[in-house]
Structures are given as structure tokens and as C-alpha cells.
Image (spheres, grey):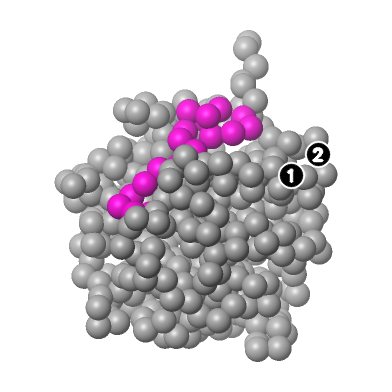
Amino acid sequence: MTAPPAYRSPSDFNARAHSRAQDIVFLSAQLGNPQDGLDAQVDQAVAKIIAALAGAGAGPGDVVKLGLFYHRSLIAHEALILSRLRAAFPADPPPVVTAIPLHVLVAGALVQIEAIALHPQGARHGQREAVSADATGFSRALRCGDLVFVGAQMARDAQGQTLHGGDIVGQAKTTIGHIGEALKEVGADLSCVAKLNTYYVGHGTTEDWAMAARVRSDAFRKPGPGATGVPVPGPYPGDVLLRQEAIGLVAPDGTAAHRDTSWPEGTWDWPIPVSFEQGLKINDLLILGGQISATPKGEAVFPGDLAAQARNTMECIDRILAGFGAGIDDLAKVTVFLATAGDDADIACVLGALTPFFSNGLPALTFVPLSRLGLTGLEIEIEGVGAIRA
């Protein structure tokens, strides 16, 4: 039996290092050399991101959002890693950031870094407005014309003390409140949220997943945002139990931009009523909530079969996008959350299922290894962002 290839860079995944949707540049997650130390790996991943930005006609000062995934053994070093990132991306106003500890990373790396930038020739680039920076030097929220990015929010007070210790419901409500406050400071509100990602400390059970979904959903009215919620190892620094980030789209008057939705018959659903949507089209941007292989009753389909679930999930995505007259090739960024111990064989399995759906290779791509997914029997969750082509 032939051993699976070693995956170290987007090209190994047959994915692009950068892709565009309108004037938004998405950068694939980059790794350093797993044999090197932490500082070297951070610097190497940053250098690859900057090289990809240059290939897209942008630079480090154009970055509006950073995603940092790091090994959970480094939780005590999170602030130092973020400080190193801030120095490497000196945008003014600063980008937002989300930092998530994981049990393992691709290739056994210590860190992987992804980014979103605005092309300097695009209209949004000159319309950047930020909420004041937090203790790490990153913006809490950044508005760029009709687009708003909110970095990871936590249940902490102004002095940095954790609120509702041990109470994930109380922390979730507080965190959603912080997202609303950050949006208000840039002239928006919670109704503008088009994508909500929640990384919660959980056991990977349907009960945990449903509870997390209910708390998040209650903050929104239909048509709500696309949503992704996945369990991660924890706790976070300071006994924080979840982090939540958001992307919003705003009308000129500060209200939510008009949104069209797509929810084809037979698409999976949550086991409880929620305000979330499966697919949104807003200002010709395409936003997918995290898609899974499940029934309309929220029960896993092909439980335990990674390849079958990956194919079924991509078929679901194809149907959702078709509701907007779009297709999978219109996606500019794909994020894959998968249950794995970090084996290259699992990545090879997923790529074997995903690649046939794309006619010209994969767009910008991030793999996020998890010890488990939120729904019992689930092996993979896939989200994406794209745009209707002119």
C-alpha cells in the first residue's frame, strides 16, 4: 500500500495560496517547519503568508483578519505568539484576530496561520474603521465599508477577569453581548452578523452541540447568520470556555444589508429550532454556515465514514450554492474541520473526496484538526465564502 503524501503547504493540498472574492483576499493557512522551535515556526508561517499576499498584489498592511491555530501545550504562550504576529502585520488600523488551541495540527506543526486582506485597489480598503485595540494590540472589530470583522470575543470584563466561571451558557451570552458592543462602535448591530463561528470547550456530544447552538441562536432573528460551532480542547487561558468571532455586512444606514437565503429541501437541520441559515447571499458575497453530513432531524449520515461524509457534505454545499445560481467553483475560501489525530491519511482521504468537486483545484484552504466534531457520529464539517462572478 502506498503511503499518503506529506502535507506541508497549500500546494500539497492542490489548493491556492490565495484566492479573491470581490476585493477580499483569502490566504490559505500556512505552517512552519515542524522540526523547528516555536518562534521559528511562527516566523516561517508569517513569511509564507506575506509571500502569498505579494502574489495577490497586497501586503502585510492590507490584512484585516488573522486566524491563529496553535498546539494546546502552548496556551501559556498565547500572548507572546500574538505579540509576534502583531509586529509582523503592522496595519493601521490593526487587524482583528482569533486564536484557537488544538490537540494537534497538520504535519505536527506548533502553529498555523491564515489571513484575510483587502486588495489595495478595492473600494473597501480605504474605508477601514476600527474599534480601539485590545490588550494584544489587535482591533476588537474592523469595519471596511459594508463589511465588518469581529475578532474572537470572550467572557471577560474590562479588567480582563473571566466572567461566569464554569458556566458556558453565561459565558456565551456575555460573549455575544461583547460582539454586539463591538459592532455598535462601528455603526452596526447584531442583525448585521452574516457568519458566526464558535469554538467551545465541549465533549463532542449532540447535547453539547445543541446547547451551544441554542444559546448562539437566541441572539438573532431569522434570517440569521450562517454558523459554525465546533468543540475544542480547553480550557482557554483564564478558564474561558468559548471564543466567538463574526463577520457582518452592513447597509449604509447601519442596519443589516439585505440577505437572500438558500435552504434546499432535504438539507440537514439542527435538532432544535434555530435562527441560523445554511447559505446567504449578501451584496453578491456567498456565505456558507458550517455544512455537515446529517439528516433534517440532525442525525449523522454515514457515521464514522470520513470519505462518505466529505462527499455528502460537498453535495449539500453544491445544492445550497445552486439556490443562488452559483457553484462550488465560486468559493474563494474553504475551511475543513475534521476529526483526526493528525494523520496524513485522513487529509488524503478528505482531499480525495473534495478535489473532484472543483474544476481548477481548491481555493484558499484551511484544515482544522479536532479530536471530535459537535454532533455524535460526525467526522467532518466544511464552511466556505465566495462571490457571485460578474
In the rendered view, does 192 fall on the left or right side of 335? left
Going by the numbered disc 2, the residue's amino acid type is: Asp
Which quadrant of the figure has residue 23?
bottom left
Q: Secondary structure at mark 2?
A: loop
Residue at 57 percent across and 46 percent down: it is: 49
* Above or below, comparing residue 382 to residue 239 in the picture: above
Residue at 43 percent across and 76 percent down: it is: 129
Residue at 55 percent across and 27 percent down: it is: 12
Q: Which stretch is magenta?
A: 7-24
Is residue 28 in sight in this rendering?
Answer: yes
* Above or below, comparing residue 390 to residue 224 in the picture: above
Marks 1 and 2 close (CB-CB < 8 Å):
yes
Residue at 46 percent across and 56 percent down: it is: 117
In the rendered view, does 321 fall on the left or right side of 93? left
First in residue order: circle 1 vs circle 2: 2
Q: Secondary structure at mark 1?
A: helix
Residue named by callout 1: 41
Residue 73 is marked as none
Is residue 371 in sight in this rendering?
Answer: no
Residue 300 belongs to the span the image colors magenta: no
Report x, y in % for residue 27.
49, 46
Q: Residue furthest top?
A: 1
Report x, y in % for residue 245.
51, 67
Which quadrant of the figure has residue 204?
bottom right
